[in-house]
Image (cartoon, rainbow, N blue to C red):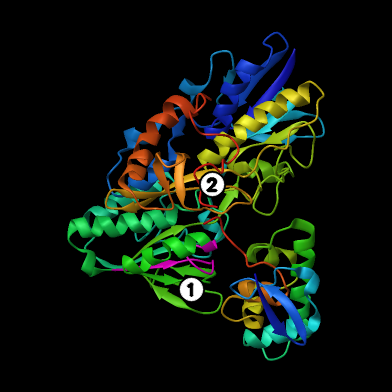
Amino acid sequence: MKNLLILGAGTAGTMMANHLKRKLNKKEWKITIVDQHKTHYYQPGFLFIPFDTYKEKDVIKTKKQFIPNSVEYIEKAIEIIEHDKNIVILKDGTNLSYDILIIATGSKIVPTETDGLAGEGWQKDVFDFYTIEGATALRDKLKNWQGGKFVIHLTEMPIKCPVAPLEFSFLADAFFHKKGIREKVEMTYITPLSGAFTKQNCSNVLGYLLEDKKINLIPDFDVELVNEKDNFIQSYDDQKINYDLLVTIPTNMGDDVIERSGLGDDLNFVPTHKHTLQSKKKENIFVIGDATDLPSSKAGSVAHFQADVLTKNIKNFINGKELVKEFDGHANCFIESGFGKAFLIDFNYDVEPVEGTFPLPIIGPFSLLKESRINHMGKLVFRHIYWNMLLRGLPMPGITTQMSKIGKKL
Amino acid sequence: MATKEIAGNTIDVNEEGYLTNFGQWNEAIAEAIAIEEGIEKLSERHWVVLKYLQDFYKENGTMPTIRKMKKSGVVDTKELYSLFPGGPLKKSSRIAGLKKPESCI
């Protein structure tokens, strides 16, 4: 019996368990998945929690219910990947040997990477919304907040779901309007990038949004420190921005086990072949989802497209065939713009987001790079698709693994 | 695609004035772009950073992040800002004849 071991039962790892139990010969292969946490969070839903649109129950289920019975599920922490010996050692000392390893350990926020951030003001005046704790603490803060300087801040790239900070800004604008306090809130968006949108097409089409919503933009801001005593954030070139309420996206990094195992780059992301998803270090290690160092977006849709390619390549690797170079960086993201509307973008490594309709020409029903109500409905419906189809590795009708040029104005 | 006359050369540039063909880059062009970016004279330290960027790009096909530059030991973030005030990556990459650093949106 051979062993295929998956590390991480988040979006990517769970999808792989579901794909592979159907594709691998049960008599030859045993599939095991390891994750230390009990709960599977629907992370795109964290965006809606601060505004009380989603409750905890909307984004929380147990991981185990999405893992097929024929796959062994081990709920324990991982100590190290001994990639020279093809063994993973768990914290409790258990050794798991593998023939093929899939790393799906994701990414997480690391507030301690920024001086002063995880200090006295953390979750009092300074919040994240990338964790359930952060999102719910921010919700409680916003309930009674009466206005002031509201600063949204992006620390450094790459981050999980790169559009989320902008969506958050648009939703916050709508939230304050609805509450009747928008004129008491001074909104500022701070980014280390040269603009809110850095791709030319997005910038041309969406650039007006911040101005329209009266959100000040401060680009090229590289944070040096956060002072939580006097409530300001300071850049390396000595710009100081005061805040009453700071919502920050801290540095995102891969899991510590990647660093301990000597498998990561300086952010603990695993160097991975861009089109095949094989790790650069070892032929029998593959990487999927947020754990890779690829220039594709860190997002569930990307992991979904990667899972199709990786499933093929695991089969190819087992059969001694050449790996397919089919992952093209395809991403598909809804961008909430507030007041019940949203944009949709669809792009890959080479093709920027463009206007058009999706997934079908003319009839869509979704419009690309245009604000619409149906895009927003799509985003809300997606939660059900995520739990019921995506995690279970079921195909999504009309949506192809490689980015399709159909319906796009290229 | 636009072209531009600079330091006695004709170069291909995009809308934002970034070279689209690195083969056309030379040091005289770098000096001239630096002046456009408000840097009167490229010092030895500027050149160290520019060469690092070009080598990094050749090897990885992407621009390094500020974090990567800090960890490389080539230049610390404070100095990077004093060399290229007001947008170190944006300016240094243009002077080095490379792409503007982008995010996915």
Q: Residue at x 73, y 11 (%)?
A: A28
Q: Quadrant of the N terminus of chain B?
A: bottom right
Q: Nearer the viewer, residue B64 or A373?
A: A373
Residue A47 lies left or right of residue A350; in this view the side is: left
| Mark 2: secondary structure | strand
Note whether A165 is above or below A193 in the view shown.
above
Residue neighbourhood size for the residue with mark 1, other residues' Cα within 10 Å, grouped as few (<14), some (14–19), many (≥20): some
Query: Disc 2 marks which amino acid?
Result: Lys
- Percent x, y of residue A384: 38, 30
Residue lying at the far top in this picture: please name it.
A27
Query: Residue beneath label 2, please?
Result: A108
Residue A234, label in figure:
1
Q: Residue at x 55, y 30 (%)?
A: A9
Query: Disc 1 marks which amino acid?
Result: Gln
Note whether B53 is above or below A91 in the view shown.
below
Q: Which residues are magenta?
A: A186-200
- Percent x, y of residue A55: 30, 38
Q: CA distance from mark 2 to mark 1?
A: 23 Å
The part of the image, by quadrant, that contains residue A403 is: top right
Note whether A236 is above or below A326 in the view shown.
below
Residue A99 makes an appearance in the image = no
Provide the chain ID for the residue under circle 2: A
